[in-house]
Amino acid sequence: MDHNHFFSWGLDASTSLIGSYDPLLVFLSYVVASIAGFCALNTINFIRTKVGSNHYLLKVCAGATLGLGVWSMHFTGMLAFSLPIPVFYDLTITLISILPAILAAIFVLHNITKLYISYLNIIFTGLLLALGIASMHFIGMSAMSMQAYMTHDVVFASLSVLTSWLLAVTTLLIKSGRINVFNLSGRGIDILGGLFFGFAVATMHYLAMASTLFFPDSTIQTAGIDNRTISYAIIISVVLLMALLMAVLFYKQRIKQLLELALTNHKRVIETIDNMQDGFVLSDEKGMVILVNKKFTETFSHAGAKFVGVGESIECMYHRISTIYLKFSNDAERMYVLDLINHGSEHTMSLKVQTKDGRWWMLRQNKTFAKSLIQTWTDITDQTSQEQELIAAKNTAFESIENLKNTQNELVEAKKMASLASVVTGVAHELNTPLGVGITALSSIKEIIEDIQRAINSGNIKKSQLDNNLETIYKFESLAMSNFERVANLIQQFRYISVDQQMENMAEFKLDKSFFDILPIWQQLGKKKNISINTDIPTNIILFSYENSILQVLTCLVTNSLEHAFEGKSEGKIHIHAEVDKKTLRLAYTDNGCGINPEIVNTIFDPFVTTKRSRGAIGLGLHITYNIVHQLLKGKIRLESAKNSQSKVSQTLFIVEIPLDLSAEQSESIASEISS
């Protein structure tokens, strides 16, 4: 197949073939070029938002789209042109013709996707695009096979390239925003740029076609694909371009919606952070501040001065803040706080600091998964004031408790003194009568002895007188002896009012065995008055305590019942029951005697309380019992009874509660006193 393709000057067109154009296909060629330009310019928006390998892949895809559009426009224009002879196309050259357009388009997109492109770069890029379009055109023209040869007028051909260059530069200026006569934005700019791009390609094509003359030559052999095949290829290209256009429009709208949604969410986040009651600081992994909120800015900025924070390092920002706004006792404390803030980015941290206006702040620091650093400043002035008030109130309460303890101790001492006074008064009262009687008896004996002595000295004493005096001395001596014995007995009981813990050592013993040893003695005493004494003691109760003191307490209760409870009764019962409640022994002592006079129920354990003082009763038995239980055995004793119809308490019931292990109880008491 022969190809005859020439460039020449001053052509004679008188013998050339006359061709014609189909206006519809001409318009279609312009539309195809415009669509290709619109798709390419829209793809730029995708490329600018991508990072990494996808960035270059998009450039190649967009360049292929733009090159395909230019190639489709060229052959659509060739289909619109008709000659009076058959025309065929070399398939290989036809396919090769698309390469210059694609390569030029990729280079153009590489330059135009930059965030900033200079005028010189725009001019150079436009020239490259025009040359790529021209190369594609003339290579495509050389693929024509017909019985004619073609020549191109150099002037018109150069004019076509120059015009295409100017229109390409205009397209790039529109896309970069340098030209905007209609105040367009977004899609409007892309549409206008696509129209100018289509116009640049179509102008170049049809001006180059105007520079071409076809001269018949029957000797040339023709071969290749016909217009029908080219038409199919163009149709496929146009369909692909339309599909790409629809995809571009869809994804552009989708991206627009996503960007608007992201912008809305961004504004919401910023507004939320700005309206926080806490100060907020966000820094990146390099330690550069990228966001501070309104609260933080208002807290750490001069009046009327713009806050400097975003864009500077967090270390510099806090160095300035610590110098101007934060309050420290000394420089060492300031450096310590700064070191925590600046070098604590690897872990969660909270720090309490004070500003010079007296307010307290809690600085909390957390690291995100993106290695950014979030810091919040919470105003805790009120909380700190409340804490200080609580501390002051606590100290005041402790002082009050201490004062109460001192007052309590003073009251205890006063009570002890009052009790001592009562005891002394009672003892003095009890001792006064027998001592007075004894002293009087001894005085009388002395007087009688002096009378006998005088009678002996005078020699006038008679036997009958001596016998009478001796009988009187014997009576007075008996009276003095009985009263002095009463004084001795009173003093002996008085010894038990103050319990001496050294009189007996603690030991382990079984309660039922102890009762088994002493019960016969109690029963023998009760038998004289027809009083039965029974016990209900489990065999598994083991104590570590003062065995004799426990038995002394119960002996005092038994003796008290035998002396006072059954007066006027021919028989009676005394019952002692024992049970264990956790670590405590509970003894229930009951008698069914005549009861206790209600007048002394509330003072039953006080010293010298008795209703039978006229019969020689002293009233120290239950007081001694109370002291042994409370002081020595570290337990409690109480009277529980009910009144009968005669306003007396019947079914006398005493409850005694003492610890099973007295040594453990004493250890806990000592530990409690030490801790308090």
Image (cartoon, grey):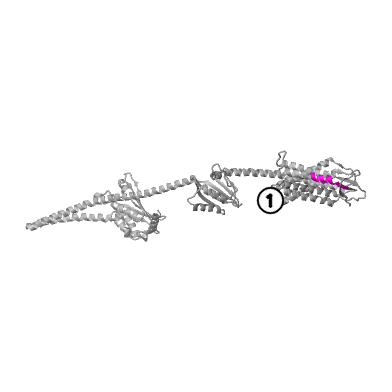
Instruction: Give the amino acid at mark 1.
Output: Val
**In the rendering, at what x and y percent does residue 393 appear?**
43, 46
Using the image as rendered, state which of residue 400 and residue 26 is in the foreground.
Answer: 26
Judged left or right of residue 599, residue 8 is right
Residue most toward the top? 182
Residue that label 1 marks:
51
Residue 270 lies in the magenta-colored region: no
Q: Which region shows up in magenta?
A: 150-163
Place residue 85 in its image quadrant.
top right
Residue 255 on image: x %, y %: 69, 45
Counting every numbered tag in the picture gives 1
Q: Residue at x 17, y 56 (%)?
A: 477
Q: Nearer the viewer, residue 448 or 344?
A: 344
Q: Secondary structure at mark 1?
A: loop
Observer-nearest residue: 12 or 547? 12
Residue 95, image x, y percentages: 82, 51
Q: Is residue 151 magenta?
A: yes
Q: Residue at x 17, y 52 (%)?
A: 440
Residue 175: image quadrant is top right
Rendering coords of residue 205 (x, y %): 82, 45
Instruction: Name the residue furthest left.
Output: 459
Is 37 left or right of 391, judged from the image as shown?
right
Task: Tell me which secondary structure the magenta stretch mostly adopts.
Answer: helix
Q: Is residue 235 visible?
A: no
Determine whether, in the image, residue 167 is placed left or right of residue 428: right
For residue 320, say whether it is visible: yes
